[in-house]
Amino acid sequence: SSVPDFSGRWVLRRIEGKFEDLMADFGADLATRRVARRMKFGIGKIMQEITCAGNELSIVNIGGREVTTTKLSIGAAEHLASGPDGSPILVQPRWEGSCLWTAMRKAEDGSALPLVMRRLV
């Protein structure tokens, strides 16, 4: 089966799950999480420019405090990448059908971060 091509410019339209908990897992303090909640976590404002080349995915995160770039090698061994906030993370992305699942850990101490799933809807 073929995998989707996420290439393009995408605007955050909705969030599933407890996003404030995800922010805390990434190290966001309470004040930052409160500001994000008041701003509806960037829904309609946060944008990602994604380019795909085979199993290489580049995600430019725009609209947060700073522009960051995350590079993923899908199906590869765990590797170092930048998180959405620019912090170093260890990632292991994989395809499951048409969904892209990314297991993540903090690079500094190896603590687990939530599993993230992307799909076209």
Image: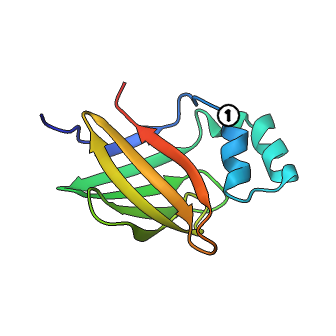
Check the image and report above or below for 113 versus 96. below
Check the image and report above or below for 18 versus 64. above
Check the image and report above or below for 34 versus 69. above
The residue identified by callout 1 is: 18
Front one among 2 and 62? 2
Tag 1: amino acid: Lys
Front one among 91 and 3? 91
**Res 6 visible:** no
Instruction: State the image quarter where residue 80 is shown.
Output: bottom left
Say left or right for 28 vs 19: right
Instruction: State the image quarter where residue 66 is shown.
Output: bottom right
Residue at image location 46% in from the left, 53% down from the top: 103
Q: Quadrant of the N terminus?
A: top left
Residue at image location 69% in from the left, 49% down from the top: 23
Residue at image location 63% in from the left, 53% down from the top: 64
SS at mark 1 in the image: loop
Q: Quadrant of the C terminus?
A: top left
Name the residue furthest bottom. 108
Name the residue furthest top. 121
**Res 98 visible:** yes
Q: Colour mode?
A: rainbow
Q: Residues within 10 Å of mark 1 (few under 14, many from 20)?
A: few
Residue at image location 71% in from the left, 42% down from the top: 21
How far across and how far down the image is residue 42, in percent?
64, 39
Instruction: State the image quarter where residue 43 is shown.
Output: top right
How far across and how far down the image is residue 16, in percent?
57, 28
- For the image shown, how many numbered marks are present on the structure? 1
Front one among 26 and 51? 26
Say left or right for 86 vs 76: right
